[in-house]
Structure formats: C-alpha cells, structure tokens
Image: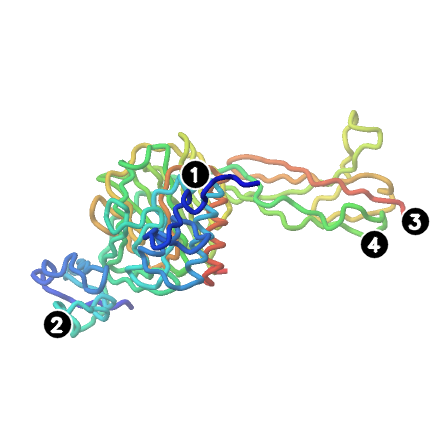
C-alpha cells in the first residue's frame, strides 16, 4: 500500500509548486475522503529547510480518489498483417517419407488476433498455365513422400479475422530424387 | 604542392583564443546537452553521442521537438530536453511535480501525485495530422490502466494518451475515438510510439512492431503533454507508477521512421545497461 501524509488546506496552499528538493516540486492532491495529502516520497526526500517540519508528518495508507471515468473505447478492427515472414526448415530436401519441412518464425498481427490456416501445393509439372495441385496437407508441417520426387512444393498461409483475410505463400521447396 | 592557404588562420586555431571546446568527434547537440545537464559518466556521454548521431543519420532528428533521455540519476540531469537543453519552459525543460525518485535507470513516478510537465502544447506545435509521442517504460508491467503520457482539453475530442493494460490497451491521438492496441508484453520493457502523418491513419509501434490503423483525428489539445500522468485540461490525473527511461515528442513520423526510432532507443538503453531485455 502506498503511503501519504495528510496536510491541512492551508498547508496545501503553502506547499503547492514549492521545491522540496532540487528541481522537484510538491504536488498536494485530495484523496478519496477529500483530505489533502502529499506522498511519502516527497516527505522523505525534503532537502529544502523551509519544509523540514513536514519530515515528521505521520504516514498513512493512501486512499486514492477515482479519476474521471474513461470514455468507453471504440474498438476498430485491423485486418491481419504479417510481422515476421515465415521461414522453412529446408528448401531442398530428399523426397523420402522420413523427411519433413516445418514453417517456423512466422508472426502475424491484427485485431482481433487472426486464425492461421495452411494449405500445401505442388507446382503443376506442366507450368503456370495449369492450376497447382493441392496435396491434402493442412498444418505447418509438410510430410514428404516418394510421389513428390523432382517437384516443387509450397504452402499457402491464410490469416483470417473479422476485419479481413490475407494470404501469403512460402518459398518453394525442391524435393529431389534420392531413391 | 603548396596551397598558399594559411590553415591555422583560416580555421581559427589561434593560440590562447577562447574557442569553446568540445570533445573531439562528439556531436555538438549531444555535447550541448551533456554540458547543460552536467553529465559526467563516460558511458552516458557516449550513448548520448551515438543516439544523436543516429537520429540525424535516420533523418528524424529534425522531426523531434523534445527528447528526454533521462540520464544522470537526478532531477536536474533528467529534466533537460536533448533537442534544446535550455533551462526554460519554452525549451520544453521538464517540471517534475510530486513524489518522484531518480536513478541511473530513469525516472520513477509514485503513481499517486507525480507528473512531468513538458510545456509542449500540441495545439501550438502539432497539426491535427502531424504529431508523434513516445515513452520507453522499463517497469512496472503489473500496472493496469497505465497512462505513461497524456493530455486532453475540456473534452475528449483532442485527447492524446495510451491506456496500457495487461489485457486490453488502447490509445487516443488527437481524437475521441480510441484504437485498440495489441496486448503489450508483461515481462519486458515497453516502448510505445504513437504517430499521425495523414488523415484517417494512426501509426502505432509497440516494441518495434509498427503498424498503421484506421482512425480519424478531430482536434489538437490546447494543454501541454505530461509524462507519467494525463494533463486533464490543467489538472493531473491517471498517475502512473511505471518507471520511464526515454520519452520524445515530435512531428509526425512514418511507419519506417517509428521503426528507426525504436531501434535507436533500444540501442541507447542497451548501451546504458537498462534495456529490458
């Protein structure tokens, strides 16, 4: 509990804006019960001899006055935004079922906090005129398998909140033939 | 090849002259502050020099109206404005009121009756779409509804203050519509920068994570900005007990400039051994 010393209104008028130590000034305030008080920190640090008599002021627990009620804030949503771009634990990896790739170090902002979804794709072998192939994996971890040999893979990451939807794409991963 | 130039004469290095000397290589603005505030610690002097040079390199020095590095460990050393270290209200020298304590870690308010008046009035020095303010708060993360700087006139239409809480935080900057902040850290220091450079957008930065938010301004406060409390139309209230280790007030900063400022502040605190982390 923070401590204060109770003073009279006359003392308040005497102390207000007077230096109690070099470059620091008294600031009497009213507590919950309407008493004028100065803080313990002011009392114990008095170096101005004019106010030495206040050094012996009894200390009591401070009962703070409730300050002006806050205006209720108006919340404004913010669409998801990327703070830290995703990294992959590997971008060149053997297409073997014992291997996998993780998405790490990614950070999103947004209000409210966005939810993140993952969708892994394989680049279409016939080029960009064709839609990439969704491979049916939906976490931040890609499990390799032999069918991915000599293909490029990536993840589409989507962040969603009530203010918007934002999608980004990771770097490509090359799954090489190590059979 | 001889140049026929008398360097000694042209550069004014006349023996016995009374040219004001500064430590070689120290930025003159940093030196002016060091002299005015009476800073003697070599680490603090070096950190101030690096800070000023860095802000100049980043081209944000000219956007600063007041910079408070809170070094030296006394009210006298902490009251000066790095941008204009004169001991006057017009230079935005701080006026410490209430039960403050001072240390090499910065300025410690008591949360009862403390505030630091900057004498910097947004109505005079900002535009409705042009202003920035920040504070680096080392401690205390347990404080709820913390107001580390603030001002407002008779109504909320020109309010400027953040309300920092461990669960729900928001900020006003030149208007009565608040913007919700991401949840601030609970175990580390908190650097909060708020800036406005164009209509309908507020730039906020929490520990370097900077982002724009949709928020329209209304008016500019006619009373000065306080640190560690709100200047509620001339009356201090919402007193905070978070220790502060840096503060600034300036014209509007871009998102990139907010990031640059955060980096400079963090480097400054690290050099002084008071970054957290």
> In which quadrant of the rendered image does the N terminus of chain A lie?
bottom left
N-terminal label among 2 and 3: 2
Where is residue A167? Give x, y as percent. 63, 36
Say which residue label 3 marks: A179
Q: Residue at label 4?
A: A98
* Lower position in the chain sequence, tag 4 or tag 3: 4
Query: Mark 2 against mark 3, which lies toward the viewer?
Result: 2
Q: Are marks 1 and 2 on the same chain?
A: no
- Please give the residue where the numbered disc 1 appears in the rendered image: B253
The residue tagged 2 is: A53
Instruction: State the image coordinates of residue B121 (x, y, percent, origin top left).
Output: 27, 41
**Circle 3: is it few (<14), some (14-19), or many (20+) Cα within 10 Å?**
few
Disc 3 secondary structure class: loop
The Cα–Cα distance between marks 4 and 2, rounded to whole angstroms, is 80 Å
To the question of a shared chain for discs 4 and 2, the answer is: yes
Label 4 – label 3 distance at C-alpha: 12 Å
Residue at position x 58%, y 44% from top? A115
Q: Quadrant of residue B11?
A: top left
Q: CA distance from mark 1 to mark 2?
A: 49 Å
Q: Is residue B218 visible?
A: yes
Is B236 left or right of B127, judged from the image as shown? left
Percent position of residue B23, x then y = 42, 56
């Amino acid at each position: 509990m923070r401590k204060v010393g109770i003073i009279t209104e006359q003392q308040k008028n005497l102390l207000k804006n007077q230096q109690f130590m070099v470059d620091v000034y008294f600031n009497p305030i009213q507590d919950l019960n309407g008493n004028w008080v100065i803080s313990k920190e002011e009392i114990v640090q008095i170096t101005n001899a004019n106010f030495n008599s206040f050094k012996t002021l009894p200390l009591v627990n401070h009962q703070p006055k409730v300050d002006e009620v806050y205006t209720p804030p108006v919340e404004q949503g913010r669409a998801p935004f990327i703070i830290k771009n995703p990294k992959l634990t590997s971008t060149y990896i053997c297409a073997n079922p014992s291997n996998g790739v993780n998405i790490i170090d990614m950070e999103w902002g947004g209000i409210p906090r966005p939810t993140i979804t993952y969708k892994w794709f394989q680049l279409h072998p016939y080029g960009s005129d064709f839609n990439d192939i969704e491979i049916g994996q939906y976490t931040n971890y890609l499990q390799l398998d032999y069918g991915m040999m000599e293909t490029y893979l990536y993840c589409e990451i989507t962040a969603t909140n009530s203010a918007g939807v934002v999608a980004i794409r990771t770097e490509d991963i090359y799954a090489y033939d190590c059979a | 090849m001889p140049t026929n130039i008398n360097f000694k004469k042209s550069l004014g290095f006349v023996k016995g002259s009374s040219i004001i000397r500064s430590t070689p290589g120290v930025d003159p603005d940093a030196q002016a502050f060091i002299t005015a505030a009476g800073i003697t610690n070599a680490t603090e002097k070096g950190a101030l020099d690096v800070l000023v040079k860095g802000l100049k390199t980043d081209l944000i020095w000219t956007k600063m109206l007041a910079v408070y590095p809170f070094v030296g460990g006394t009210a006298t050393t902490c009251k000066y404005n790095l941008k204009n270290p004169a001991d006057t209200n017009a230079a935005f020298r701080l006026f410490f009121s209430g039960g403050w304590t001072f240390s090499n870690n910065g300025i410690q308010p008591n949360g009862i009756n403390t505030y630091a008046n900057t004498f910097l009035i947004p109505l005079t020095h900002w535009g409705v779409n042009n202003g920035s303010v920040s504070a680096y708060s080392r401690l205390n993360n347990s404080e709820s509804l913390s107001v580390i700087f603030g001002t407002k006139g008779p109504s909320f239409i020109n309010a400027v203050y953040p309300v920092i809480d461990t669960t729900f935080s928001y900020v006003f900057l030149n208007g009565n519509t608040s913007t919700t902040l991401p949840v601030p850290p609970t175990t580390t220091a908190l650097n909060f920068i708020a800036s406005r450079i164009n209509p309908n957008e507020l730039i906020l930065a929490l520990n370097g994570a900077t982002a724009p938010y949709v928020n329209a301004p209304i008016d500019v406060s006619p009373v000065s900005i306080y640190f560690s409390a709100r200047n509620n139309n001339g009356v201090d209230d919402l007193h905070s007990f978070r220790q502060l280790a840096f503060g600034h007030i300036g014209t509007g900063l871009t998102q990139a400039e907010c990031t640059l400022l955060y980096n400079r502040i963090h480097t400054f605190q690290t050099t002084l051994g008071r970054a957290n982390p």
